[in-house]
Image (cartoon, rainbow, N blue to C red):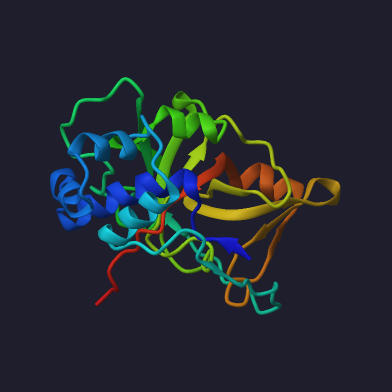
Amino acid sequence: MRNIYNMNKWNELAKARMKETGLTQDKLAERLGVTQGAIGHWLNERREPTLEMIARILNEVGLPPLGVAYPFPRPGSAPVNRESNAELLGDLSVWDEGDPLDSDDCEVPYYDEVEFAGGNGMTEVVEVADRKLRFSSSTLRAAGVDCKSAACARLNGKSMERLILDGASIGFDRASTSIIDGEIYAFNHGGMLRVKYLHRMPAGAVRIRSENSEEFPDELMTADQYRDEVVMLGRVFWWSTVRRAPRT
């Protein structure tokens, strides 16, 4: 069993939800019976609220409580169902656009798949200019990530559910590219932006594993395939629970 999110992420999720619903810090402060300054300090990690206050904030913004967990399926044996399972987060931001950076803020770049000209369906993974997400530097330090090495994208698809939901944003560390067995990594797989568990295997082979392994069984790459097809982007250190609206 694992938590959908932990205490180190609650403030960023709360701010994203406030942005999504139009809830201001002033209005939230009024509902909670505190000052707007206190809300600003808590959301930007300048001060730490009590667990009771965190629970009240999450309830007011419409997020589930800390510690919600789900069981995981065991790896399956169905045919490989390979997908590109990450994409640009778009205009979602945990800070309002145009807000000046606080002294402890860090702007993190986005990565996305871009289709080549000609409409042949081929893509490449690139950093997208002028699209960023802001984190507090203290949050990155707690995760052992340097601001200059952090980047982000968004999950697309259900291969990592029940751990990371379809539409959730992720953060990854571009300085952490060596595979540690069982860690989650973002990588460029022949122009596909993917987010998966990776495991080292004998003779340099690599196992690619999805959380939803019943629908997306393990993939095994030889050392040559991994070297020729994969460009490592970095270890995933953060993800949100903000989920996109159902497709219609």
Q: Position of residue 46 (x, y in %)?
A: 36, 29
Image position, residue 70 (x, y; %): 56, 71
- The structure residue drawn at horizontal position 27% and vertical position 69%, both measured from the top left corner, is 245
Q: Quarter holding the C terminus?
A: bottom left
Quarter holding the N terminus is bottom right
Q: How many marks?
A: 0
Q: Position of residue 150 (x, y in %)?
A: 46, 33
Q: Position of residue 128 (x, y in %)?
A: 32, 38
Residue farthest along the top direction in this orientation = 103
- Confirm whether residue 112 shows in the render: no
Choose top left, top right, bottom left or bottom right for residue 93.
Answer: top left
38 up-or-down from 56: above or below? above
Residue at x-position 35% and y-position 59%: 242
- On the rendered structure, is 67 left or right of 242? right
At 48% from the left and 32% from the top, the residue drawn is 140
Q: In the current view of this chain or complex, which residue is farthest to the right?
A: 202
| 3 left or right of 87 in image | right
Q: Is residue 19 above or below residue 84?
A: above
Q: Is residue 69 above or below residue 110?
A: below
**In the displayed structure, does residue 209 sit left or right of residue 112?**
right
Camera-side residue of 87 and 126:
87
Residue 7 in the figure: left or right of residue 2:
left
Q: Nearer the viewer, residue 176 or 112?
A: 176
15 or 81, which is in the foreground? 15
Front residue (pair 147, 221): 147
| Residue 6 in sight | yes
